[in-house]
Amino acid sequence: DVKVTQSSRYLVKRTGEKVFLECVQDMDHENMFWYRQDPGLGLRLIYFSYDVKMKEKGDIPEGYSVSREKKERFSLILESASTNQTSMYLCASSLYFEQYFGPGTRLTVT
Amino acid sequence: AQKVTQAQTEISVVEKEDVTLDCVYETRDTTYYLFWYKQPPSGELVFLIRRNSFDEQNEISGRYSWNFQKSTSSFNFTITASQVVDSAVYFCALSEAPGTASKLTFGTGTRLQVTL
């Protein structure tokens, strides 16, 4: 079974803090993705990576950056957290087609 | 640009009723893939099915069935004899043909509530 884990289920940060969200997958998948999920908006792609050190912007990359130093780990970075980044963040990985998701991190920025 | 529309925001049914979740998509690609995911209250999205654009056969898996119609750009999902455990948010998604990485475009989801 594919296992995607995320470092925290719940996180509370203050405005202006630097925030790291970590995602690890154990299936040697090439592709990894970060989404945010907001009510009424579904899932929106922030960034994705198709190989180590490779990254591409998704639909809403502003205010975020990512890092992929190892194949199994994909980090999402909020350089200076803002209240409009309060959301559920979902990480996923894939080999070809279907993506497998982690449990999500609910981030609150106060 | 690709787009997925799930017009039903919320559906409430009583256990044992059949329910259909609608999904309409837009794409200019001739080769594409369609997916359904389930998000139970625990939050983790669970993959249910993948369909490619060349395969219009309907699929049945237990109480779940999927109806893919290219003529109407729809990929609807029916749950027969619904159960309380089916309560979840269901997402339809569309992917371009796999290349460097198959990105998914999601609909906004349909929340299904099944009550006793």
Image: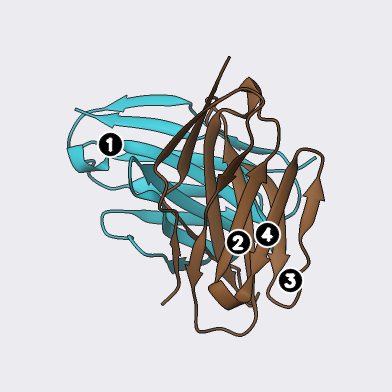
Q: Where does label 2 land, which residue?
A: B75
> Dot 4: few (<14), some (14–19), or many (≥20) neighbours within 10 Å?
some
Marks 3 and 2: in contact by CB < 8 Å?
Answer: no
Q: Are tags 2 and 3 found on a single chain? A: yes
Q: Where does label 4 land, which residue?
A: B67
Which element type, helix, strand or loop, lies under badge 3? loop
For residue B107, above or below residue B48:
below
Residue at the (73%, 43%) spot, across then down: B64
Which label sits in the foreground, 3 or 1? 3
Which element type, helix, strand or loop, lies under badge 1? loop
Q: Where does label 1 land, which residue?
A: A86
Q: Where does label 3 land, which residue?
A: B56
Decide if residue A22 is in sight here: yes
Which label sits in the foreground, 1 or 4? 4
Which sits earlier in the primary sequence, circle 3 or circle 4?
Answer: 3
Give the alpha-carbon distance from disc 3 to disc 4, as whole Å.
8 Å
